[in-house]
Amino acid sequence: MYVTIIIPTFNRKAFERLISFNINTQTYPFIKEVLVADDGDPDQALDLKVKYPISYHTIRRCTIGTKRNYLNSMCTTPYIACLDTDDMYHPDYISNAIFQLIKSKKNVAGSADMIMHQVSTKTFFHQRCLYLDMLNEATLVYTKKYADTHSFTNASSGEGISFLKGNTHDIIETDIREVMCCLVHDNNT
């Protein structure tokens, strides 16, 4: 039950310590590799200090949906976990999601809710979403089998809509408190 962590990035060098921390603190014991697709400034390339093999791909400028599809195509493991660069992930994020996937016999786990921390004001917000096919892309863990037959929209945001639309029967929702907290800052997209 190996998993590949995929990270689309663009000029996020300021977050490389957070990204490394998020990866290194995951409790899931079968992380095979980390795949990064970077279409930003070469001076902003990530220098991640992680305990897993990293495959770093510098690519031409494209949308985040295109980067996610590119990374999915590179995966060889049965499971794929999305990790965004500027979020704080729960150490059991991957473990909990894969447990839920196996238990439910579904192909996609994630949360439609979001906990956000406004960095400048030190304020927390909890956003609720009632639509199961509107899971936040940064919370997704899914099977390679699913990724081989579904694509992210070629968009700069909301790229998960086409990936999930019409497939609520194949989705298990995870508790956002066991997934991540979105850090809201001046450079959010």
Image (cartoon, rainbow, N blue to C red):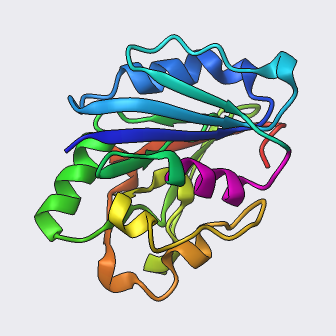
Is residue 159 toward the left or the right of residue 115 in the image? right
Residue drawn 51% across the image and 68% down it: 128
Is residue 102 toward the left or the right of residue 165 in the image? left
For the question of whether residue 50 can be seen, the reply is yes
Is residue 39 toward the left or the right of residue 69 in the image? right
Residue drawn 83% across the image and 42% down it: 60
> Residue 56 versus residue 187: which sits nearer the camera?
56
Q: How many marks?
A: 0
Residue 155 lies, in percent from the top left, at: 76, 65
Residue drawn 38% across the image and 83% down it: 168
Residue 156 lies, in percent from the top left, at: 78, 59
Above or below: residue 124 compared with residue 160: above
For the question of whether residue 130 can be seen, the reply is no
Residue 124 lies, in percent from the top left, at: 58, 43
> Residue 16 versus residue 89: which sits nearer the camera?
16
> Residue 26 versus residue 147: which sits nearer the camera?
147
Q: Quadrant of residue 10?
A: top right
> Residue 31 versus residue 161: which sits nearer the camera?
31
Q: Is residue 158 magenta?
A: no
Residue 135 lies, in percent from the top left, at: 49, 67
Q: Which residues are drawn in magenta?
A: 61-72
Q: Is residue 63 magenta?
A: yes
Provide the major secondary structure of the magenta segment: helix
Above or below: residue 102 compared with residue 79: below
Looking at the rendering, in which quadrant would you find the N terminus? top left
